[in-house]
């Protein structure tokens, strides 16, 4: 019985530095509808003859600022918990 307790203590001592070592954050945001035209592609059609739609889409300044704010907030939370961020915190909202 004592060997079992000793083994359990050793396993827990080895695992202790790994417990709660990594925390992942996932942010959600909103996209403001953009008024951009949807162009029909006459050259490309599906098998049944329906034209393929092409969407002209890009990130707006609102979404980029929102993502940058989210990343800075998460980095501040991690630093407040005496943690370290792994990787670069993007200040412009862009992904590497």
Image (cartoon, helix red, strand yellow):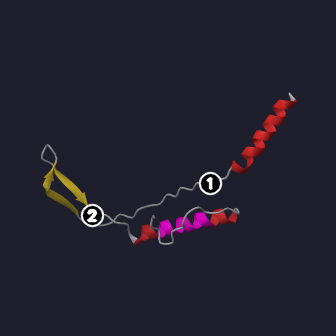
* Mark 1 vs mark 2, CA separation in Å: 36 Å
For the residue labelled by badge 1, is the local secondary structure a helix, a strand or a loop? loop
The image shows residue 62 at horizontal and vertical percentages of 43, 70
Identify whether 52 is placed above or below 65. above
Residue 75's label in the rendered image is none
Q: Is residue 61 left or right of residue 8?
A: left
Kindly identify the residue that appears in the image at 63 percent across and 53 percent down: 22
* Mark 1 vs mark 2: in front: 1
Q: Does residue 44 appear to the left or right of 84 in the view shown?
A: left
In the figure, is residue 62 to the left or right of 8? left
Marked residue nearer the N-terminal end (1 or 2)? 1
Residue 23's disc number: 1
The residue that mark 2 highlights is: 56
Range drawn in magenta? 65-75
Residue for point 24% across, 65% down? 37
* Residue 67 painted magenta: yes
Identify which residue is drawn at 58% across, 66% down.
Answer: 73
Residue 95: percent from left, percent from top = 45, 64
Q: Which corner quadrant holds the N terminus?
A: top right
For the stretch drawn in magenta, what is the main secondary structure? helix
Relative image position of residue 29 (x, y in whole percent): 47, 60
**In the figure, 29 relative to 92: above or below?**
above
Relative to the observer, which residue lies in front, 30 or 51? 51
Q: Can you say whether 38 is above or below 8 in the image? A: below
Q: Position of residue 54 (x, y in %)?
A: 23, 58
Lateral position of residue 79 relative to residue 48, left or right = right
């Amino acid at each position: 019985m004592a060997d079992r307790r000793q083994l359990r203590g050793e396993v827990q001592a080895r695992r202790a530095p790994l417990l709660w070592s990594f925390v992942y954050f996932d942010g959600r945001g909103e996209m403001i509808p953009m008024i951009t035209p949807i162009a029909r592609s006459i050259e490309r059609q599906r098998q049944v003859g329906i034209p393929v739609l092409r969407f002209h889409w890009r990130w707006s300044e609102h979404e980029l600022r929102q993502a940058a704010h989210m990343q800075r907030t998460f980095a501040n939370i991690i630093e407040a918990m005496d943690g370290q961020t792994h990787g670069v915190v993007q200040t412009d909202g862009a992904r590497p």
